[in-house]
Amino acid sequence: MPTDRPARLPDLDTWRARGACASVLGLDLFFVDEGPDAGEGVPIVYLHGYPTSCHDLAPVLPALTARHRVIAHDHPGYGLSAKPVDYSYSLIEQAEVALALWRSRGITRAHLVAHDYGTSVATEILARRERVGIDIELTGVTLCNGSMHIELAGLRPIQVLLRGRLGPLVARLASQRVFARNMRRIVHDPKVFDDAEIETMWALLNAADGKARMPQLTQYLVERTRFWHRWIGALTRLDLPCHVLWGDRDPVAVPAIAEAVAGECPTAELEWLEGLGHYPMVEDPDRWSTAVLAFIER
């Protein structure tokens, strides 16, 4: 599906060259670290969604890094990071990996931005901060289009299948065509992702036999139910500025989730990105980055 607009998402080789790999808790982790080391703005740390990677952040990096240092990484099991067979892929371990990476990069203070799957990693970090403390001072958090209230989420059929007993078979049968169809159904306009961008995202998913890891990764849906009280509880007691930034045409992380989070979090400020779907940072990079920066710098 070619388009007449400039590509928002870089090709695989260009993206790989922008980042680096680090060994974190015994895992090779791909990350990008851009922006001024000692700029005026607080650093931004980013947690990406499922089933893609921090490649999603590329369209908004120029705006964010004009004044802020930004660190984004691929969670284990995603993108260009390690995808071991013998690993839990628990959201709890994903939080530990993120904190360890930020610590290794010298981050002591940051604003946390999370999208989709990343919002559950973020709520584990907030729960840990509340219960035992973390060694990074968070100045605030932006939660974007994530199904934290799993009971309200509009899960896609393929997610349900990957989570179940047939998951390994479904993963083997998955194709770029199926992937493209699913990605284009969750954004406001199917033309958001052109064919070349879909090919790059699919290559990132498949790197290091990543397709075979999808049933393991999809078990995060089970954890969202199991640890619901821990993670939603942390939001109900949050003492940090909380930005609930939401594409209001998301068929997965539906608007009711944003309303629930904004209603239960005492510090939440709800901001709608009208007309956008599940990947608002790609669908309208200018509007998304303007909203994030305005909240951080206010």
Image (spheres, helix red, strand yellow):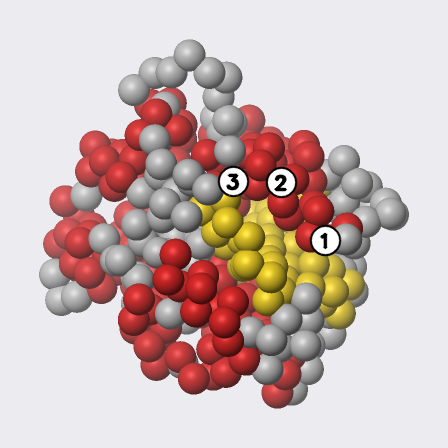
Residue at which label 3 appears: 281
Q: As drawn, which residue projects farthest toward the bottom?
A: 131
Indicate the quadrant containing the N terminus: top left, top right, bottom left or bottom right: top left
Q: Who's the residue at 79% across and 41% down the image?
A: 67
Q: Amino acid at mark 3?
A: Met
Question: Is 32 or 297 nearer to us in this picture?
Answer: 297
Q: Who's the residue at 71% across and 47% down the image?
A: 294
At mark 1, the secondary structure is helix
Residue at which label 2 appears: 289
- Does residue 254 sit above or below 100 in this rendering? above
Q: Who's the residue at 50% across and 17% down the image?
A: 6
Q: Earlier in the sequence, mark 3 or mark 2?
A: 3
Instruction: Determine whether, in the image, residue 103 is placed left or right of residue 97.
Output: right
Decide if residue 181 is in sight here: yes
The quadrant in which residue 260 appears is bottom left
The quadrant in which residue 238 appears is bottom right
Q: In x, y percent, where is residue 261?
A: 48, 68
Q: Who's the residue at 31% across and 53% down the image?
A: 252
Q: Earlier in the sequence, mark 2 or mark 1?
A: 2
